[in-house]
Image: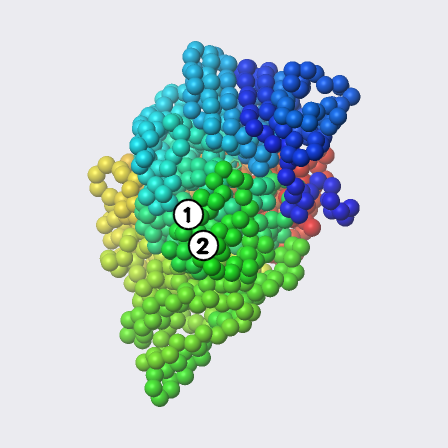
Amino acid sequence: MSSTQAANAQYLADYRPYPFILDQTVLDFALSPDATEVTATLSLRPREAVEDLVLDGGRGVELLSLDIDGRAPDPAHVRRDGESLTIAAAALPDAPFALTTRVRIDPSANTAFEGLYISGGIFCTQCEAEGFRHITFYPDRPDVMAPFRVTIRSDKPVLLSNGNPVAIRDGFAEWNDPWPKPAYLFALVAGDLVAVSDRFTTRSGRRVDLNVWVRPGDQDRAGFAMQSLIKSMRWDEDVYGREYDLDVFNMVAVDDFNMGAMENKGLNIFNSKLVLASPETATDADYERIEAVIAHEYFHNWTGNRITCRDWFQLCLKEGLTVFRDQQFTADMRSAPVKRIEDVHTLRARQFREDQGPLAHPVRPERYEEINNFYTATVYEKGAELIGMLKRLVGDDGYASALDLYFDRHDGEAATIEDWLAVFQDATGRDLTQFKRWYTDAGTPHLTMTEDWDAGDRGGRLTLNFTQHTPPTPGQDDKPPRVIPIAVGLIGPNGDEVQPTRMLEMTEARQSFTFDGLGARPVVSALRGFSAPVILDRPIDDRNRAFLLAHDTDPFARWEAGRDLAMSALMSLAQGGDAGADFIDAIGRLAADRDADPAFRALCLMLPGEEEIATALAARGATPDPDAIHAAREDLARRVAEAHADLLARLYDAMEVPGPYSPDADAAARRSLRIAALGLLNRIDRGDRAEVLFGTAGNMTERMAALNCLIRRGRGQAALQALHDRFGDNRLVMDKWFSVQVMAAPPQDAVAVATQLAARRDFDWKNPNRFRALLGGLAANHAGFHAADGSGYDFTADWLMKMDGANPQIAARMSTAFETWPRYDKGRRDRALSALQRIAAMPDISRNLREMVSRMIA
Ligand code: PHE
Ligand code: ZN
């Protein structure tokens, strides 16, 4: 490390293999809420010459004893600091040896939910990224892999760990995981749990016992999770040829969990909101997300577990690929075009936003202080986009053979992005040197496109001229051009496609492509399927946008044309101009188009969100005004509702789904169109429809939609009370109850509503879901969070500071509410900055939050 670099930072360039090889890990847990004893025996041998042995181990780990091959070393050779334990080389044999430690930890005091903790009486673990070091002393890095044998002693009835069960009896369980794995994939669960069980036979005939473990009473909400698991197992065999490799697969739901879920080998642990679902308590969106996350965690068994990451800089190697795979899965299970639109929508809302501000970082970062701060939209969602681009560039067959080679070559290894790209180069012969910039360079490229038309004598020629430019991001000023796949199609004046999708490969800063032999000047459908994660700028008028919305054969491009039209109407309204009759006409025609998928029509009816509008404005160099954006969006929604009142009312009635609730894609699609119509009608019917729907809805999707509408009309009180009366003891429903009130509040009331809710006894702020419901709800109320008086900033800062003392990961993650602050006006900037400075000055601030805040104010 050079002296100019921060003392706490880790650098990709500093990688060096661990000097010891770990052949086997044996763990014994004697569980007790405040004094759990962990005995670890590590079979180690020096990789080359013997060096000092450094084991990670945090402050909460009390060392009771340590021996090497059964003998305690001279205490002078053992050194302990706050983060590690070092045994001097002089105390180590120059041959294989067994290191045994006995430690004591206190799960009941663990409010950070990292390592071993207790959630609702259930012992459980979370070890990614560096949680294992809070359990025992260990080389806690992903490139140190070993088979694990685990024994658990506890009076809890269900005792689980990774791998296959060896012996299970009262108060005791032994598990063996034969597949070498890094410590971050270790898991242990002990509790009073019941299972929904099933069985799966892999295509080579291995029989696998499947269990979804939940708290007694929750079994009736676990069936959908089991079905999702079975679908995922079959899909990974069918599409990627990947089979499951143990005799059992266990999933557990816990209420306190920092993230969504975790892919521990053979023992996936989930945030209960991503497992438990019934029509009465979960929305269609919840069902879709549960299916996707269960698939995601299951897919990690090959992309993440069998092949893991060499170091945490390579996080996107497993996450980008696994997100890409779960996106493919959902596209196959449901509507592929709708899924693509949803994914692009989230990418823009979260990743473009991140890329635009002070937290921008490459998909493969080169430095971090706290790795937990890099589980980001850039690593996950942009990481997945890069894989989609690779697939577009090498074709489906090239992709398939590259993936086969990847699994063949790296199974059982801890790999890098270089390994990943090498597999594509070797399988397809394609040079990916330039493509690699997508991994190393942060920022969203801006692409411009202009057209030249030459009518000619023998057929017309269309020339498309592109330029690319990526704005500077922290620490990266100049960005050389990247390879950008641009999918283009051409639509003739009569609406027929005259040029089916062609993949243009842009590699230069400016580059032109021509299309010859055209009859008449076509309309260009560009960046079809969102073929690259870029911002496309092109001079196109509303008439041609409406034309594409009506005629484009590519569903994404069609939706995008509608989006552009809406944006242009909003811009015009925000500047005191007209509403854009083109948009209102076109959207009406689309909503009425019975041939189109209802889910697609619903997506088109949804106006861009306020955050999205702000991000789009900032990308064009404008300063977004949250109040003006809010007003313009409300105005446009009302105009759409007024212009299409009859049509929307007909749709609302027609899209009612008869019969018992089913979460399948078709029924969900109809409900989504019905709810989109309701949201617009709600602006002109005083909330009457919503009131009726709230009283009669037989499912949570419509009930929540109705509640949202009622709150927006200022008449939510009775409905809120009714929901509370009925579901007050259901944590997941109450999370929705908290968040909807803040999210749907009029901006000027949002902070007051949040303040009131935060004072309630059932605001159990240490529960990450509850905290996120409230603070995330406020952050999602764009004009409320960005209140001009800074009250949203102050409220959020106060709570982040409080949360930091209990759970630094959650505090750091939620601090991203501030990540866009530099794009606003001076008044807001000053207030946001002083809130951030207040956080930065906090004594005992965690490394997590400190790194986030200092990046944001740098
Ligand atoms: N690896 C998990 C996933 O993407 C996410 C996670 C990260 C969970 C860190 C917990 C802690 O599936
Ligand atoms: Zn993942």
Q: Are marks 2 and 1 in contact (CB under 8 Å)?
A: yes
Q: Identify the residue at image location x=29%, y=42%.
A: 664
Q: Which residue is mark 2?
A: 427
Q: Residue 45 in the image: x percent, y percent? A: 63, 28
Tell me how many marks there are: 2
- Is residue 687 visible to the viewer in this orientation of the structure? no
| Vertical order, 10 against 397 (above or below) | above
- At x 44%, y 65%, the residue is 486
- Mark 2, Cα crowd under 10 Å, few <14 / some 14-19 / many 20+, is many
Could you say which quadrant of the image residue 102 lies in? top right
Instruction: Tell me the number on the disc at residue 404.
Output: 1
Q: In the picture provided, is 710 more to the left or to the right than 133?
A: left
Residue for point 42% across, 15% down: 168
* Percent x, y of residue 61: 64, 22
Foreground pick, 189 / 649: 189
- Front residue of 41 and 497: 41
Q: Is residue 429 shown to the viewer in this render? A: yes
Gap between marks 2 and 1, in whole Å? 9 Å
Q: Is residue 697 left or right of residue 8?
A: left
Amino acid beneath label 2:
Ala
Residue drawn where x is 72% and y is 18% of the image: 73
Query: Which secondary structure, mark 1?
Result: helix
Q: Earlier in the sequence, mark 2 or mark 1?
A: 1
Examine the rendered structure and indicate whether residue 15 appears above or below residue 262. below
Q: Residue furthest left?
A: 659
Q: Position of residue 314 (x, y in %)?
A: 56, 45
Amino acid type, callout 1: Asp
**Which disc is residue 221 wearing?**
none
Question: Label 2's element?
Answer: helix
